[in-house]
Amino acid sequence: MNYLIPFLSALSFYLLPILTGRAIFGRIIRNKYSALTSLLLYYVAGVISLYSFTYFGLTVTNLFLPQVINPFSLRIVYSLFSVVIIILNILNISKPELTKKSALISLFVIILSVFVYAIWRFDSPYPNTLNWDIFEHQTVINAISQGKIAILPSRLTDTFGFDGYSTIFHVLSAIPQIIFKPDILGYWWFVEGLHLLTSVAVAGLLAWQFTRNRYITILSSVVSAFTFDSTIAFSNLLLIPQTLTAVVCAMAVSCIPDIFKKTIKLQVAFLIPVGIFMILTHFIIGSVACGLFILTLAISNLKIAKKSGLYTGLALSITCGLLLMTIFISKISNLSVINNGEAGAYIYSISQKITFLLQTYGLSMFILLPIGIFTGLKRNHNSLKILLFALVISIAIVMSPLPYVMKFYSLSRYYVCVLMAVGIWIITKNINSNILKTITTGVISSSLLIVFILNITIWKNNNISNGLASQVSGDEISASDFIKSKFDNSDLIVSDPSTQYILESLSGINSAGGAYMKKGNRQELDYALKSTNLTDFEKYTSQINDKLLLKPTMKIVVISDRTVKWLNMTDKEKYNYASNIWKPSIFSLYEYKFMDNFAQFNNLKLEYANDSLAVFTLPNKNITSL
Amino acid sequence: MKFIKTIRHIFTQAVILTVCLSVAVITVAGAIIPDNPSVQVGFYNLTKTPTGFSIYQPGGANRYYLLSALSDYLNDTNGQKIMLRPSAQSASLNNSIMQKSQNIFNTITYYFHLNPFITKVMGNNLETDYSANIKSNTININQKVTGLTFRPSSLISIISYQDDDIVFDSNGTVFTESLPENLSIVTKLSGKDLTLDDPSFRYDQIDSNIVYLINPSIPGVLKITTAKNQLISIDKNNKHIEIQTFANESTSDITAEYQIESLPNYLGIKI
């Protein structure tokens, strides 16, 4: 039962939109598109419907009947809505179009995903997390679960200083959390497992749609499962807006062989909801994904494009154009200042990018991908040329000298999976014995699995503490539960960026900017932590504010081992959004001594303490002069 | 003609298989490998060194606790020290392909906690095998010295500590010259009272099989537990925790076994 509720809520992240889309648009979609295309359309149309329903519903109710909005009423409304959706689906139940071979491949994909997730979670068991970003998303989800709504996350929490996406991803998570009230970390644990399953399945679907070869389909899934792009892209193992966008983009591209035969009207009807979904889920990645999809669809429509020269010519022209444009942009503007300088930490040289690829694929990518590309170019595989086209353009973006571009690799990697699978197929297809073929394929797959384990070992090295790979500790979860039970939304958590980021997310109580604490607040916190009397401490903490909660009743001051580590950082690190104290720990004696002295000097009231942190309270006073 | 066809077929298949195997090997050969494979034990990491093991905190304070053949020694029946003296060959790092393969193998097996740490050290005509089995937050150390041409009375295994470390036994006696304020924090966190040992005693034999080690800048506590028939002594001049294991009359080899546990919090201290 402990696992069932989080699992059901995670499942609802995918299932509820599909059922909603099917219930509302089933009749329109079903007769016009293939089963695969319909499934994608159900999902994106369902998400957009749920988002619209939530946005307009909450906006109007907040305007006219704000008193009726509370967690209980929201739970009733969404539960009733889900029941209606389920009934409508049951009334229109149809026999699934699944052959025995497809069912076996689906079963293989599920087993493969469970196997890889078990390896990934070997030292990070339920409900530990290795996804630092979930805390900021959960903070927005908490706000929505309390009945607040806005298009941009920064309107709901000051944890977001830069709006890279709308709140569609958060509404999608908030609905299952409102209905089921799961353990928050448990929900994320399961939903990331399901995300892995979708990314493995989509790589297989993409291969099947463009090659109609079951062997390549299975291999593409295997490559997707065994390769974790552990630098910024995080495609298959972490669920964040960019990785969800990438899965939907890959699935949309996999629908191209079905929809390019349809009328332009039907193609546009497909493109609109998919495009809206991708752009709302991630403004930048979604827009690029949308552009990439339109280009790929357009070139599929061109009859003249069947001559491979045009694909190559167009791909190379667009690639060169994109690279020149991005080089020009990087020369004329200082993009490293984006997001208070965080962007500067995410500009990589070509050699660094190659190192990341080696960490993800070993040398396999440099052998198998060229074989896959040459196969696509040489053979009479027009459909593969379409994938090549999409790959070359997306890789051009990844290789450009702009910040955050590695994020776009989450779009490219699905084409890489298919083409590497084609490479393996080319090498092994002339082996006559099926047993030998299976063994050799198994050996190549095993080599990818070895690289995967080496890769995740390196990636987790900075996140292991007290025997667990996790970015949050049991002590922090207990402290969040205490804060949740003792304080309310009129209070404000004040701590170092990492601690308040985690506590805000898990307790639902506001903090002064979470991990994206503003420079001024960081400076005041630095002074406050160095103060040796209550008067000074009150002066400095009174300057620490949340732009959305200007007059908090109480300031909840939390001193943790992360706080002391933050205080001991250099000034440059203290003010940098990219510097966080990633892993939890308990107090060392020196850290405890700091906390103890600090509390005594400043005469703070201790509310709660454990081995990792201490929670104090300070009645808020408005002191403006220093 | 058929024979030639068959040979050609076999040759083609062999070439394809070789290519496939080469792809697999090259894939792994090009992978990025962790510099020094280690395994997490509580708040510490355990890794192999050419002469034994090292226990350290990754990314934290630069503290290493070494279990090494460089410091361990045997006592003969006349009370003379016989150092294990590892040879230069066993102490040198080998950067060959074998070393890389070994690192890959170790990284994977350590990830799943499948492989005990084993370091074999040769020197002074003796072979010392260090092995470490990890269960949860505990390292079970087994140190076996073989190739003995004389009858030793005991094996001394040494864990060296550092200037600011706090070392105390399960009676609450502190053997290091630690600051009272640091001791009072330990008392506050563990609920156990600690008393300073007489600093004029430079070599103490402990009336206990448990020693605790805390570094003030590293979170957590290391608990060292020996068997009842072993002795623990503290050499304050050299900053050594010495574990003395007596030879068994029936065998010519000598084996020391003890545990090092990383306690998850200070409440784990039992006095």
Image (tube, coloured by chain):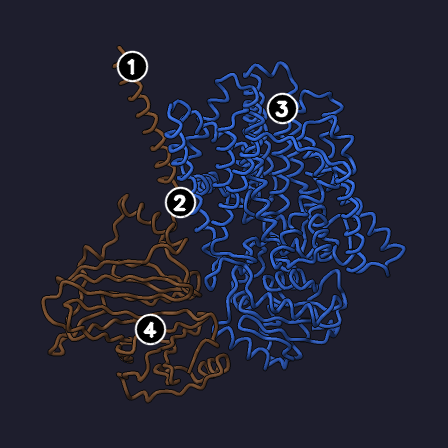
- Would residue A469 be found to the left or right of residue A266 on screen? left
Q: Mark 1 to mark 2: distance in Å?
A: 43 Å
Q: Amino acid at mark 2?
A: Ile
Tell me the chain of label 1.
B
Q: Position of residue A561 (x, y in %)?
A: 53, 69
Q: Position of residue A305 (x, y in %)?
A: 60, 16
- Would residue B4 be found to the left or right of residue A242 on screen? left
Q: Amino acid at mark 1?
A: Lys
| Tint of chain B | brown
Tell me the chain of label 3.
A
Q: Which residue is mark 2?
A: B32
10 Å crowding of disc 4: few (<14), some (14-19), many (20+): many
Pointer 3 with pointer 2, Cβ within 8 A: no
Label 4 sits on a secondary structure element that is loop
Q: Quadrant of the C terminus of chain A?
A: bottom right
The chain displayed blue equals: A
Q: Which residue is mark 3?
A: A257
10 Å crowding of disc 2: few (<14), some (14-19), many (20+): many
10 Å crowding of disc 1: few (<14), some (14-19), many (20+): few
Q: Which residue is mark 1?
A: B5
Foreground: disc 3 or disc 1: 1
Q: Which residue is mark 4?
A: B161
Pointer 3 with pointer 4, Cβ within 8 A: no
Q: Residue A401: name its quadrant.
A: top right
Q: Are marks 1 and 2 on the same chain?
A: yes
Q: Are marks 3 and 4 on the same chain?
A: no
Pointer 1 with pointer 2, Cβ within 8 A: no
Q: Are marks 2 and 4 on the same chain?
A: yes
Label 1 sits on a secondary structure element that is helix
Label 3 sits on a secondary structure element that is helix
Label 2 sits on a secondary structure element that is loop
